[in-house]
Amino acid sequence: MRIIIAGGHGKIALRLAARLGQGAVGLVRDPAHVADVEAAGGEAVLCDLEKAGVEEVARIVAGADAVVFAAGAGPGSGAARKDTVDRGASVLLADAAERAGVRRFVQISSMGAGRPPAPGRDEVWAAYITAKTAAEEDLRARDLDWTILRPGRLTDEPGTGLVRLAPSVPPGAVPRDDVAAVVVALLAHPGGAGRTLELVSGDTPVAEAVATG
């Protein structure tokens, strides 16, 4: 399969490229990141989703089997970039997927999205959750075979292959390795389309969790 990954240099995206191999196409905005995507086993394409137009992105997406939105403004970015990346880039990628006729779309969101930010959290966190919520709402309104995945607190610990995946799960953590494994399984399992799923570590093997979640 040819899978387009927005945010191709991110920690989840690189793990995803390693699992998908040559079919993975990571979109990166910095030429210095190309080598890392290639070292992970994927192909890198330069594309800044904060500046690109829909036609440019649609040309890249054309012919793909699926797209994965794994982009994020990242630590240290301000509230404004939470909107332009976590919301705006997702909307652009979905627009491009529709234009290119690519129906499968997996969006990596966050636990906490879908409801107002918790009281007492800082402005940047509130902007992040607001942006993720808006991106989810935009995707649900589209005629695409979408799946929204909301991981819990992300860690760099080795994956266990054991998760808890359901429309609602208690708060918890999950290794980025296991998030990537779940995305790969979702791409291979059409039954996940049209669902919003939360993800934390658990005791169910990934393939079983995706098939039954």
Image (spheres, rainbow, N blue to C red):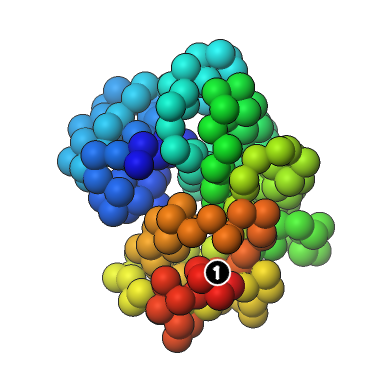
37 or 106, which is in the foreground?
A: 106
Left or right of residue 23: residue 213: right
Based on the displayed image, in which of its 4 quarters is residue 122 positioned? bottom right
Q: Is residue 171 above or below residue 16?
A: below
Based on the displayed image, in which of its 4 quarters is residue 185 positioned? bottom left
Which residue does the image show at 34% across and 25% down from the upper left? 45
Give the residue type that dot 1 points to. Answer: Leu
146 or 157, which is in the foreground?
A: 146
Residue 84: % across, % down: 63, 31
Based on the displayed image, in which of its 4 quarters is residue 85 positioned? top right
- On the question of residue 208 being in view, the answer is yes
Judging by the rendered image, the residue that carries numbered circle 1 is 199
Which residue does the image show at 30% across and 48% down from the upper left? 20
Which residue does the image show at 38% across and 62% down from the upper left? 181
SS state under label 1: strand
Left or right of residue 58: residue 182: left
